[in-house]
Amino acid sequence: MKATLGLVALATLATASAASAQDPHAGHGAQAGDPHAGHEAHAPAAPQEPPPGPTAFDADRHFPKAEMDAARARLRHEHGHMAWSKVMIDRLELRPGAGPDIYAWDGFASYGGDIDRFVLKSRGEGARKLEAAEVEALWGRAITPWFNLQMGGRQDLQHDGRTYGVVAVEGLAPYELHLDAALYLSTHGDLSARFEASHDYRVTQRLILQPRAEAHLSAENVPSQGVGAGLSHLELGLRLRYVLTPDWAPYLGVEHERALGRTARLARAAGENPRGTRLVVGLRAGF
Amino acid sequence: MSRLADLPRRRFLTGAAALSLAGLLPGWARSAAGEASPQALSGERIDLTIGHAPLRIDGRKGHAIAINGAVPGPLIRLKQGRNVRIAVTNTLDEDTSIHWHGVLTPSHMDGVPGLSFPGIKPGQTFVYEFPVIQAGTYWYHSHSGVQEQMGHYAPMIIDPAGPEPAPYDREHVIVLSDHSFLHPHEIIARLKRQAGYFNRRRQTLAGLLAGKDQPLGERLEWSRMRMDPTDILDVTGSTYAYLVNGHGPQSNWTGLFSPGERVRLRFVNAAAMTIFNLRIPGLPMTVVQADGQDIRPVETDELQISNAETFDVIVHPTADRAYAIVAEAADSSGMARATLAPRPGMTAQVPPLRRRPLLTMRDMGMDMSGHGGHAMDMSMRNPKNAPGLKLGPGVQAIAPMPADRTGDRGTGLADAPHRVLVYADLEALKPNLDAQPPARTIDVHLTGNMERFMWSFDGAAYSEGAQPITLRRDERVRVNLINDTMMNHPIHLHGHFVELVNGKPADRQPRKHTVNVMPGAKLAFDLTANAPGDWAFHCHMLLHMHAGMFRVVTVRPLDGEAA
């Protein structure tokens, strides 16, 4: 505050003295200098130029300036500058079915202010052993009232452990649709993208039905990951969660996954089923 | 401290300290106390101590930051025309402060750390000293961090030097407040993490099928705008206990009367985040004072009291029966409750909570009345509707057609089947000293993002370096507060009374220290900037202020300064 006001003070010092020299009525009611004041007795006057910012603080006349400077800094800080953390485990679930149960997770933690935040995301799944896991470290920035831009890196922990640069946009679209679109460029030069959309239908105060869709696209074939160019992967889910508290909500649901196009052919060639539907049981938690 | 204390007060302080150990309250706040006037600290020298204290609400134990060991703190009773010297000792391990809300003091006695003074350091005693130039019902509270939410508040009465314009046989001070067992920092963090965290009464599909709330088309329209018509108070009865003089609803605070007496009830809303709708079923209230300023008496059945406002009413119970004092949160998520009775131990029937209200397009600043056929740009975030305002992520909307809502009933009262006080009813009892037309107009937008829990004036939080609003000493200005959000904002200007532009003649516009700006409203007040210094100007929803809805108003020249 000191620095800002100081600058304003410097910048306005000249104009202030000029203005007060020209305006002998300053401090005696500005209307004295306004020739139209008399004609507007019952209507508010049009906005006028405000007086320049003051060059000194009133409190500094009564208290030590150093103490006031420290208190002024705290006043600024206490009124809007707040760092807070958020942990959101969107899905922590088990998908029982024929063969070994599949487990999966997807969530993030973030820390920062309203505009700039550090975001750590993780998702993955496995059956008997871990099949896929990844971590993203992102700088998030609020760019509109509803949407955040996120930029950073992603590290795959399985397959060939690729590293990617990430640019993503996530937020709330009209009709309260949660959207997340991310673009990935790996150090091997392969480009891919993911799109997620979901909506929360509040059935009762405690029951929330969430349809969700996710699509993966790839610009080229990445045989080491079993991914073919084009639309490679689609997930459609429907989860019904019970809000125990706004922080904890167990859910039941169904998840349909399928590989598409060339990716599906690669899966079949590897002896895997490119599509599957399973019940899911899991927990959503945020705090 | 003992050096300053005179004997009667010493006795009181000792008593208060002993009571706080037992989890009890200062004399004025005790239930069914028999006095015609509540016990108070008075005289020209008063000592206060700020410290940690245990707190008990309806049997549940908590922790408070308290004045003289209790929540609320002691009632201070002063006399207009005298001087007062109040020594405040800080026993906390953090800074504290006291702001005398609505009391006109020199700027450096106003109690805002970082603006009027450095604050009171741990272990330090700060002596406030000022002439008491006004009369009325006020209150005082911390202006440091979020201490106010933790119990650091208390009432103040200033008796007039001359005759009392609204005489009474008996009086009770009724301080309404909200208490959560969550730390206020945790409350704000939860609101930032998850929009509407404390709202447990949203619209549901089950409700739609049952024909409740909005019909489908309207729901889709609001969903398209990403707005929730049930988002009325950010923090609700799901975490708050609503208190009367520190008593939870189960504890049934009781104020005694003898049938036939004229009883003055001095209501203070000391809540951090709650607007109350206040009624005494079966007993009409004659409102005689608002924000400590006498008004022309007006009889009503219910009034809304926004954060930091005070209303004095006179009731005249003639029957030998109990009456319920019902202060329902404006979102109907809970209530503070007390009893007015001829004898202790009586209760009256307490009405159930009302249906949760829904916001409307009028709350969105889309006032369609009187503009039929006129093509208006109704887009919700058009920069043309707020020239010069920075449309960042913290500004969800700009009200396209804000309305004068001084004649509207407050949120939650649209369907009340009885008389309801509105701002347009308020009229100063005595003419205002300055009724000149304002020479300058200042527009201030109240801006926010409910999804991110961001709040600001003109799109800039105070922490972002928002610059002061500058006034020339003694100039007369009109300030238009334009509420671009769907929340009520009680806006408080320190150091001055503002005259609410409510349709009354210019010299009878009611004088207020805090004005509630309804959602989507444009509310105007006139102001003579006659108090030199640096003054806080902020939303009195504590967490809105904490999120950045705070500015400084400067009035220059100072005494002894060249114009």
Image (cartoon, coloured by chain):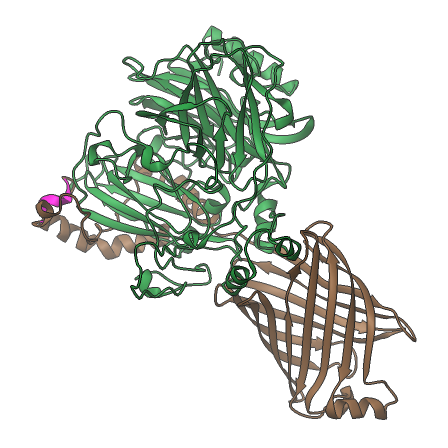
Dominant secondary-structure state across the stretch colored magenta: helix
**What is the count of numbered marks?**
0
Res A173 quadrant in image: bottom right
The letter of the brown chain is: A
Q: Nearer the viewer, residue A75 or B269?
A: B269
Q: Is residue A188 left or right of residue B109?
A: right
Kindly give the residue lying farthest to the right in the view shown.
A99
Q: As displayed, is residue B389 above or below residue A99? A: above
Kindly give the residue lying farthest to the top in the view shown.
B7
> Which residue is pictured at 48% across the width and 66% down the height?
A144
Q: Nearer the viewer, residue A235 or A266?
A: A235
Res B6 quadrant in image: top left
The letter of the green chain is: B
Question: x%, y% of residue B425?
Answer: 33, 33
Res B133 quadrant in image: top left
Residue A204 visible from this viewpoint: yes
A33 inside magenta stretch? yes
> Which residue is pictured at 45% across the width and 28% down the height?
B268
| The magenta segment | A29-34
Q: Is residue A77 left or right of residue B117?
A: right
